[in-house]
Every structure is written in structure tokens, then in C-alpha cells.
Image (cartoon, rainbow, N blue to C red):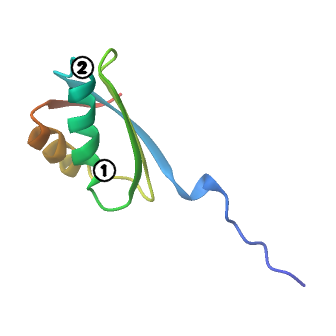
């Protein structure tokens, strides 16, 4: 008998945040860089035109940790989209 191994991407959590103040590619990079340093984050996609930041992580992120990372980059986390 073989065990059912779950190796799919269902082991990750995708969260979309609203970030205020991003206006260009440099802004996107600064926000992405700071958030990607958080433990468990596997990808970050920031879009200045919409103010949306999509984060894929191993588990749900602490919103205050994300807020601190966005603040460190010089922008404002509005909340989850």
C-alpha cells in the first residue's frame, strides 16, 4: 500500500494586500524586497498601478509583520484586499 503524499501547491497561502503610495517600478521593488524577507514568503508581486501586493507564503502571515515591512519600505499598508 502506498500513502497519499500531498506535494501540490495547496500547502501555500496567497494573500492580497492594498498598499498606498506606490507609483512606479522602484516602489514595487522596494515593497517586494521588504516583504520577501519575512519568514515563509515564497513570492511577492507588487503592482503600483493598482496598489495591490500579492504574497504567497507557507502559512498565513501576521498582518502586523507585513505592515512593518511595508512601512520600512516607506509605504502604507491599507489592509487585506
42 left or right of 75 in image: right
- Give the residue number, with chain letter if any, for mark 1: 36
Residue 15 screen position, x and y as percent: 41, 40
Q: Disc 1 vs disc 2: which is toward the camera? A: 2
Cα distance in 3D space between marks 1 and 2: 18 Å
Point 11% across, 39% down: residue = 71
Splitting the image into 4 quarters, where does residue 26 fall?
Answer: top left
Splitting the image into 4 quarters, where does residue 55 fall?
Answer: top left
- Give the residue number, with chain letter if any, for mark 2: 24
43 left or right of 72 in image: right
| Crowd rating for badge 2 (residues with CA inside 10 Å; few <14, some 14–19, many 20+) | few
- Residue 60 versus residue 52 in the image, above or below: below
Query: Looking at the figure, which quarter contains the C terminus?
Result: top left
| Crowd rating for badge 1 (residues with CA inside 10 Å; few <14, some 14–19, many 20+) | some
Earlier along the polypeptide chain: callout 1 or callout 2?
Answer: 2
Point 10% across, 43% down: residue = 72
The answer to whether marks 1 and 2 mark residues whose Cβ atoms lie closer than 8 Å is: no
Amino acid at each position: 500500500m502506498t500513502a497519499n503524499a500531498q506535494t501540490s501547491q495547496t500547502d501555500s497561502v496567497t494573500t492580497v494586500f492594498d498598499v498606498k503610495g506606490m507609483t512606479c517600478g522602484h516602489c514595487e521593488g522596494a515593497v517586494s524586497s521588504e516583504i520577501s524577507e519575512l519568514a515563509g514568503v515564497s513570492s511577492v508581486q507588487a503592482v503600483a498601478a493598482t496598489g495591490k501586493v500579492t504574497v504567497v507564503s507557507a502559512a498565513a502571515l501576521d498582518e502586523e509583520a507585513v505592515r512593518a515591512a511595508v512601512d520600512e519600505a516607506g509605504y502604507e499598508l491599507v489592509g487585506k484586499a
